[in-house]
Image (spheres, rainbow, N blue to C red):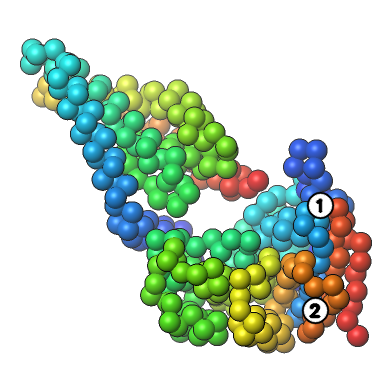
Amino acid sequence: MNGPAVARAVLAKDLLLDFRTRDRLGHMAVFALLVVALLSIVLPASRIERLAWSPALLWVVLLFTSLLGLARSFQSETEGGALGLAALGTLLSAMSVAVRFREFLLPVLLFPLVLPVLVLASRITGEALAGREVPGLWWAAFALYDWVFALIGYFVFDYVLED
Amino acid sequence: MSAVALENVSKHYGPVRALDSVSLELERGILVWLAGANGAGKSTLLRVLGSLTRPSRGRVTLFGVDLFAAGGAALRGRVGFLGQDASLYGELSIAENLRFCARLRGVDEADLHRTALELDLGPALEQRVHTLSQGYRRRAGLARALLGAPDLLLLDEPWNGLDTATAERLTRLLERMRDAGTTVLVAAHAASGPLPGFDRTLRLEGGRIRGDGIAA
């Protein structure tokens, strides 16, 4: 079976699994909503300041919400989320799945590595919200980050899955 | 050319030697019982042959191809593996699990249903795995391993959780696969003497082969 056909089979299986475990997605959505609700209370009242904070907070909420699912995702092999987080998150959750303290290890490994994508995503979102054009170099850096970790994952996955 | 050849294969987990300089050859179309107490190295040997774990030392060859060298990955489609747990998605039905594996292996629906029928999975085929009894889960795991008539079949304690009738049915099935040319390696610690119908018995102890008996 060729690569694209395998990818299609895995995608179909993952979507079905995600649908069957949709209660977990519900928990993640409730968590995200709670954080957003809390932030809307504690953030400064001025619209300008809120707009300045929003992109960074949006992506931090996304990161923490995705962490809720990532630690378990590899146990049932369901990956999801934005591509930048998914490529790295899938690799790291596979690495940490056999470790006793995986709930602790995964964020410790993930946070430093995901920092560039977090900064870039916040900047791009900020520019987009302000109605300004996003520099092409930022998109290129984003794409490069995704490709690097997707490629690393592709080449080291067999080793990661072995004992 | 032998189906399986191991040359001085060792596997260490830190200070623990799960396999210690194991060398053996298995021909095609043979039913082999891998015997030994708990911790003897049976499961590790099967995991090495199933390319689920890389040996610390030594060379593993399946059908003349080095399993852990370039090109070895292509052998995985010729190997059926059942570990100590059934490795199925609990939220999917048996049919959905088997259909997914069949797609990965390029096996058609007819073969899938034939395999399910041979293990009497019919009544439970559409039920989700996490709702099933241990016996049905075991049978579903066996069906997954048998899909596509693999050339090498590796089974770790396959009779665990099976009722007597299904266990006997499985033994007959393994004999038929052996007769059709499949090399079948079964790890089981229970019996004291050679299992009936098996051609060869390998006894593992402390990660080494301490006995190698060929049935008369």
Check the image and report above or below for B33 versus A114.
Answer: below
> Which dot, 2 or 1, sits closer to the camera?
2
Tag 1: residue type?
Leu
Q: For this rendering, which residue is in front, B81 or B161?
A: B161
Q: Residue, x 79% and y 49% (percent of image)?
A: B18
Mark positioned earlier in the residue sequence (2 or 1): 1
Label 1: few (<14), some (14–19) or many (≥20) C-alpha neighbours in 10 Å: many
Q: Quadrant of the N terminus of chain B?
A: bottom right
Q: Residue, x 42% and y 73% (percent of image)?
A: B95
Subunit of label 2: B
Relative to A15, B56 lies left or right? right
Relative to A112, B206 lies left or right? right
Q: Quadrant of residue A139?
A: top left
Gap in angstroms between the C-alphas marked 2 and 1: 23 Å
User: Can you tell which mark lies on residue B19?
Assistant: 1
Tag 2: residue type?
Leu
User: Can you tell which mark lies on residue A7?
Assistant: none
